Image (cartoon, helix red, strand yellow):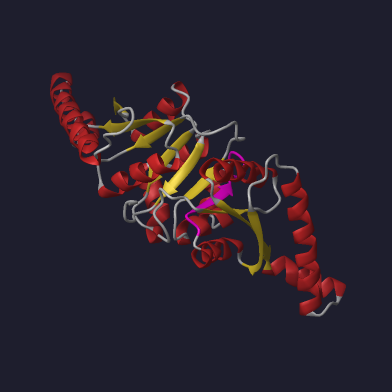
């Protein structure tokens, strides 16, 4: 990471001029104002459409690119002019594959956070098919905020699903620095070891209950150690919640029932992002969840 995440000095917002990107732009501007951060607004002109436009207009490559850049800059400035209290910002235009260029720009410009808009209810299906968002998530050198809701002020309630791993600790520390004023709650969803296999093998209810109670007791003890080891002495203590069942479904229910507006998701590493999303928080949950999503891959915790 380019700087301690608790500094959050530089935000990179990438826009494709869609309604989803406008929501992300408004959120990025709000975060930049709140944290006193610099804001870079990036638009990537896709190479393929640019080449088609050049051929149809029978332009030289340099002329076609210059015209595309002029149009994109004008569109960017128009959209920025609609934002109230626009923080200090710079505009960056690039040509290439959007996902790769977003990640590359974040690294070159020293961004501490990438902000992207989620496109509709079928977001993750598009992601897994190789969309811009997926490419950026997979290659990003820093956390990525995927915005699904219109910004209505600072984040108020943050849900932190945890498996008690080092990656989960990192995600918790980053989310705390990212939204320091928000209420935070850890959630762990447990099942007894081999519970499903025992159920389908015809195990007695009393046997299943014994192992479920044991799993709950172990999870409660692990949660206590996990929170204590974080060392969050200042501010209110985070909430904790244990749920029994299928993790993706239980995470979705908690988000809906308790009005969380941000969920911080730890992934294993950037080369295995798709597998991590499908393994720890399923495709169904990410598609259906309605709050914003902070994706933190395996990396060192902030200072």
Is residue 118 magenta-colored?
yes
Q: Quadrant of residue 52?
A: bottom right
Can residue 43 be seen here?
A: no
Is 170 positioned to the left or the right of 49 in the image?
A: left
Tell me if residue 204 comes above or below residue 177 in the rendering. above
Q: Nearer the viewer, residue 53 or 125?
A: 53
Outermost residue on the right side: it is: 57
Q: Residue at x 32, y 51 (%)?
A: 301
Can residue 211 be seen here?
A: yes
Q: Nearer the viewer, residue 59 or 193?
A: 59
Q: Residue at x 35, y 37 (%)?
A: 161
Q: Residue at x 64, y 54 (%)?
A: 89
The quadrant of the image that shows the N terminus is bottom left
Query: x and y percent of residue 176 in the render?
Result: 38, 39
Q: Nearer the viewer, residue 174 or 65?
A: 174
Query: x and y percent of residue 24 in the render?
Result: 61, 44
Q: Residue at x 68, y 41 (%)?
A: 85
Bounds of the magenta segment: 111-121
Outermost residue on the top side: it is: 206
Tell me if residue 50 comes above or below residue 196 in the rendering. below
Query: x and y percent of residue 8 in the render?
Result: 47, 50
């Amino acid at each position: 990471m380019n700087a301690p995440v608790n500094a959050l000095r530089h935000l990179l917002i990438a826009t494709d001029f869609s309604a989803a990107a406008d929501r992300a732009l408004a959120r990025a501007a709000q975060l930049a104002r709140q944290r006193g951060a610099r804001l870079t607004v990036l638009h990537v002109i896709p190479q393929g459409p640019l080449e088609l436009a050049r051929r149809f207009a029978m332009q030289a490559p340099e002329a076609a690119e210059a015209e595309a850049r002029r149009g994109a800059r004008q569109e960017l400035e128009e959209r920025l002019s609609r934002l109230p209290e626009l923080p200090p910002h710079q505009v960056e235009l690039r040509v290439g594959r959007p996902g790769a260029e977003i990640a590359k720009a974040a690294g070159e410009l020293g961004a501490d956070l990438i902000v992207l808009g989620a496109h509709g209810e079928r977001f993750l299906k598009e992601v897994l098919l190789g969309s811009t968002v997926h490419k950026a998530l997979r290659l990003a050198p820093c956390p990525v905020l995927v915005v699904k809701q219109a910004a209505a002020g600072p984040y108020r309630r943050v849900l932190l699903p945890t498996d008690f791993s080092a990656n989960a600790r990192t995600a918790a520390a980053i989310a705390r620095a990212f939204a320091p004023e928000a209420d935070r709650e850890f959630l762990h969803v447990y099942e007894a070891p081999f519970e499903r296999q025992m159920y389908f093998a015809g195990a007695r209810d009393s046997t299943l209950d014994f192992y479920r109670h044991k799993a709950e007791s172990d999870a409660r003890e692990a949660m206590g150690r996990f929170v204590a080891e974080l060392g969050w002495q200042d501010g209110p203590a985070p909430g904790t919640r244990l749920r029994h069942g299928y993790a993706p479904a239980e995470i979705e229910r908690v988000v809906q029932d308790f009005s969380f507006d941000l969920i911080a998701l730890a992934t294993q590493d950037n080369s295995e992002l798709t597998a991590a999303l499908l393994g720890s928080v399923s495709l169904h949950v990410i598609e259906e969840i309605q709050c914003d999503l902070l994706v933190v891959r395996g990396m060192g915790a902030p200072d």
